[in-house]
Structure formats: C-alpha cells, structure tokens
Amino acid sequence: MSKQLLIYQDAIPISLEKHKDWCLKSTDSFAFAKDVNSFPLLNVEFFQAAVAYPIVFIKTESGLYPSAIVGIRDQQNLFVTESGEWQADYIPAFVRRYPFVFSMSEDQQTFTVCIDESFEGWNQEGLGERLFDGEGNQTQYLNNVVAFLQDYQAKYLGTEAFCQKIMELDLLEDMQANLRVDGVEQPPLQGFLGISREKLRNLSQETIYELMQLGWLELMHLHLHSLNHFSALTKMQSEN
C-alpha cells in the first residue's frame, strides 16, 4: 500500500495467522500526523471541521475530495504539538481511524481491514485491546473498529456524490492563499480549488432548491466561510 495514504507507513491486511496475539495500547499522541499539512474530509464533517480549519477541494487522478488544511508549509501540522497533542476540538475521521484502514480490491467490490504495523502502540504483551480472542475470533473491539470503517466508507460514497455534483455544476475555481507571518510575505499556498461565489450565486432557482434538499448548499457555504481560518493558521505559525 503506497504512501498516498499520508500517515500510513506499512499497512498490512489483518490475519489471524499473523496477528492472533497482537494488542493495541491506546495513546493520546498524534505524532504520526505531525508531518502532513492537509487531511481528507467527509462532507458530513464540514459542520465540525469548519469551526477550526480551512476546507478546500483537491483534485487528483482518482477524483475530487474535500480537505482540511492544518499547516501552511509542506510536512507541517500546526495542530500537533511537540508532545503529540492535537490542539483543536475536532479531529478529522481520517486521522481518528488510524492505525486501521480499509483496502479496496481492484474491482472495488471487496474491502479488507488493514493495520499500519509501524504504529508504536502495537505489542504482543497483552497491553491494551486485543484483535482476536483466545479462540481466534474477532474481539468486540475489532468488531467496533470494522463498524467504524464501514460507516466511514458509506459516508465516503456520499462525499463522492457531493463532489461529483460540484464538478457537474462547474462551480470550482483555482485558489491560492496569500499569507503573511510576522509581517513577512510567505510563498503562496497553492494546488487546491474552491467554490466560486459568483458561480454559486448564478445557479438557477431549481438547482439551488435541489442542493438545499440534499443539504449540500449549506455545506458549500460552510466551505466558503471556513476559508477565513487561513489567517488563524498564520497566527499559529507566528506563535510556533
């Protein structure tokens, strides 16, 4: 599994043969996320994420997805302290599911639960939550993890539909954030897209009504409002 998964270094499918005695010791450290300056978001996360982060859209070969910006420089997460504490009330689900993740088959029909074996919380000394019980069955803890991943995947499909609609309506425009830290102009933050306010205003009443019924118009406005947080990021950078 490639590094495109951002925080996953060595994601391997869970197997009873290999991971029968593996346990996960809980930790409050988010040090694993300190070198990433943006994280994918589900559209249902906009309500909470827009309070703390600029939300933008990033287009890749695999499609369009929303993203929370957490740093203004490469390999920088301003919300993770030196001690690994996350300094915001809301943490993206992409981060919270770590060190677990679904791997999709090539035909996109089968999902396999994987773990990042490089995560420091893994042990075989019985510390924390077991993945399998003594009889080789999934523990309730692992069942709960799988349920969370399934819910994430279902909401991811809803996010895909939301992004597809945005592209169909041709609402996006290239954006960049021009930032100043301690009075010094910084290299502009580029490579992302945002919804054009003008294009949004010019939508037909019928389309506006459709977006309202789907709950997507509100999400679009949350995205636009969240862009004000770029100034908060520069303040955090100054205090770093």
Image: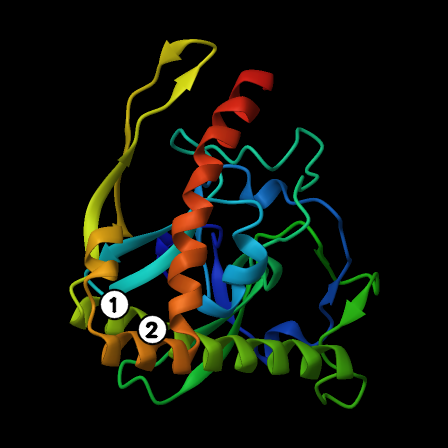
Q: Amino acid at mark 2?
A: Phe
Query: Is 166 in front, or is 5?
Result: 166
Query: Is 238 in front, or is 36?
Result: 238
Mark pair 2, 1: CA separation:
6 Å
Left-right relation of 152 to 124: left
Res 151 quadrant in image = bottom right
Q: Secondary structure at mark 1?
A: helix
Give residue 162's mark.
2
Residue at image point 43% right, 64% down = 219
Q: Secondary structure at mark 2?
A: helix
Residue at image point 75% right, 83% down = 139
Residue at image point 41% right, 58% down = 221
Q: Position of residue 135 (x, y in %)?
A: 78, 90
Query: Is 203 in front, or is 131?
Result: 203
Q: How is the image coloured?
A: rainbow
Q: Amino acid at mark 1?
A: Ile
Q: Position of residue 163 (x, y in %)?
A: 30, 69
Left-right relation of 14 to 24: left
Q: Are marks 2 and 1 in contact (CB under 8 Å)?
A: yes
